Image (tube, grey):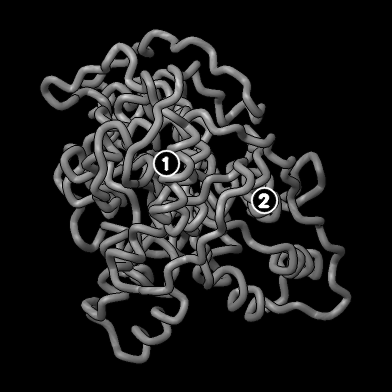
Amino acid sequence: MRARPLLALLAALASGAAGCTSEDARGPALAAPPSASDGGAGATAPAAAPALAGDPARGERLVAEFQCNRCHDGTGQAPAARDAHCVQCHQDIAAGRFQAPAAAMKRWNENLVQLRDVPSLAAAGDRLRRDWIRGFLLSPHDVRPRLHATMPRLAIGPEQASDIAAYLTRDRREGHEHPAAPLEGASAARGRELYEAKGCGTCHAFSGTTGLTAVAPVKGMEKETRAAIALAPDLRHTRDRMEPADLVAWVLDPAAIKPGTPMPQVPMSPAEARDIAAFVTTAELSPRAPASAPERLPLLSRRVTYAEVDRRVFRVTCRHCHSEPDYALGDGGPGNTGGFGFKPRGLNLATYEGIAAGYVDDQGERRSVFSRGPDGAPRLVAALLARQAEEAGRAAPAVRGMPLGLPAVGPEEIQLVESWIAQGRPQ
């Protein structure tokens, strides 16, 4: 798809839980919640560590360097130009506002599922723990299961992540202080009842919990409904992402904290909000099942041509970040002309000749994407396999998975690329 900018960044820094009604008996004060990351049912989270050090001024400069505003609103910086804003470009195509031939618009819309919705970073300090933001930037994982894309692995180190986290959480609403015991007297059992009664699972997944009433996803495709479902985080992560007091405030009135959020306000009392928060932050979680990457398929014996590989792989996602500016109707993408904190690599996957020309290494030398690494896989194939490994929770420090932040290419497509390379890359 010849869209103007790129399919790339997606961050996952947004909302918390859902709404409720009615009051009843209150339970005893609650212990510290189990962590979602430890996978342990009923395990107690460690005591909160002091706020991580970070320099907001440096963080502001890094947010500009990593071009966060090309996907996210709420960065505190001016929005990216229309022809450089990944999400707005896709929204324009979906809405028919993009200036292109009708046939091209029809073809693009048939395949446009990526980056139509992305969370705003506004009011991050009122919603998210600084240390969680830092850790997420260093090790992104899937927070929103109904979004196709995830936060990509940026070229970022611990100090940079601390600075960005400090910048994003620099402002909190005036007077927004934590109560000493925000969930005192709250009932997680009552919170569970309220969670189900109000259909919170219509938008939110809550993986690791058992026995919740299944709710069919809403089928309406109105912009607000679609965005609410797509951006709704898996509530398993809420106990790690949010302070209990911030979660209570969020459930009571999301728009008061983050204007424009698709999270609806459901009428409830403060006591009911505490019950909901108690359930979300203390519900017993089953350990995560170990994830595994798909099995690597053997080389094909039939002939594979560039035309087939281009149609089924390169044209589907690769060209969004690796093409020439005149093709992309933009800047050529971070994989070619640079962007999102990445150096220009001069890798153009839009043509046979461009692929054959390879990429530019750190010393300014041209290198082949077909050269083989220690495991024998061509560099291009290794990057595709690395993305599968990232989705299984096993990021390789030496290889950045591709496509960046987007769903991994399937085993059949990787088999096709690898077979084409093994056959001498016929046109």
**Foreground: disc 1 or disc 2:** 2
132 left or right, relative to 376: left
Which element carries disc 1, helix, strand or loop?
Answer: loop
Residue 392 spot, x, y in % from top left:
67, 44
Residue 162 spot, x, y in % from top left:
37, 20
Is 372 located above or below residue 257 in the figure? below
Going 27% across and 33% down the picture, which residue do you hit? 124
Report the residue marked by disc 1.
343
Is 4 located above or below residue 399 in the figure? below
Q: Which mark is residue 419?
A: none
Amino acid residing under circle 2? Gln
**Quarter assignment of residue 199:** bottom left
Which element carries disc 2, helix, strand or loop?
Answer: helix
User: What separation in Å lies between label 1 and label 2 (alpha carbons)?
Assistant: 24 Å
Is 219 located above or below residue 358 in the figure? below
Task: From the viewer's side, name the closer residue of 243 and 370.
Answer: 243
Going 52% across and 53% down the picture, which residue do you hit? 145
Task: From the viewer's side, name the closer residue of 261 and 424.
Answer: 261
Q: Which mark is residue 388?
A: 2
